[in-house]
Image (cartoon, rainbow, N blue to C red):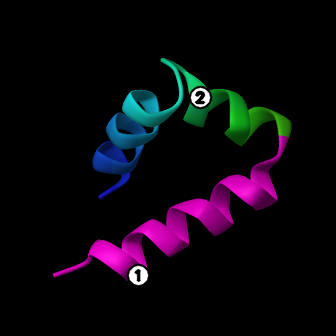
Amino acid sequence: MYEQFIELTNQIFWEGYAEQLAQENPVKFQFELNDFINTYQN
């Protein structure tokens, strides 16, 4: 799921968005990742 999150955010925003967010605002990154997992998990 992590790789899918990275790929999706790169498509929606820009290449490297998730990595930049993880460095600049790790709390928001974790929130967004958890939300993605909770929304799209099988």
Q: Main secondary structure of the magenta part?
A: helix
Task: Say which residue appears at 43% left-offset and 67% top-offset.
Answer: 36
Is residue 32 magenta-colored? Answer: yes
- Magenta highlight range: 25-42
Task: Say which residue appears at 52% left-offset and 73% top-offset.
Answer: 35
| Tag 2 and tag 1, C-beta contact below 8 Å | no
Above or below: residue 22 compared with residue 35: above
Is residue 33 magenta-colored? Answer: yes
Of all residues shown, which one is farthest toward the left?
Answer: 42
Mark 2 or mark 1: whose residue is earlier in sequence: 2
* SS type, badge 1: helix
What residue is disc 2 on? 17
* SS type, badge 2: helix
- Count neighbours of disc 1 (C-alpha within 10 A) and say few if under 14, some if 14 to 19, many if 20 or more: few
Quadrant containing the N terminus in the rendered view: bottom left
Q: Position of residue 30 (x, y in %)?
A: 65, 62
Q: Left or right: where does residue 40 sit relative to residue 14?
A: left
- Distance Cα–Cα, label 2 vs label 1: 20 Å
Mark identifier at residue 14: none
Residue situated in front as seen by the camera: 23 or 8: 8
Q: Position of residue 29 (x, y in %)?
A: 67, 53
Q: Left or right: where does residue 25 sit relative to residue 15?
A: right
Identity, as a three-letter code, of the amino acid under mark 1? Asn
Task: Say which residue appears at 52% left-offset and 61% top-offset.
Answer: 33
Residue 10 quadrant: top left
What residue is disc 1 on? 38
Identity, as a three-letter code, of the amino acid under mark 2? Tyr
Above or below: residue 38 compared with residue 5: below
Task: Say which residue appears at 39% left-offset and 72% top-offset.
Answer: 37
Residue situated in front as seen by the camera: 11 or 21: 11
Of all residues shown, which one is farthest toward the top?
Answer: 15
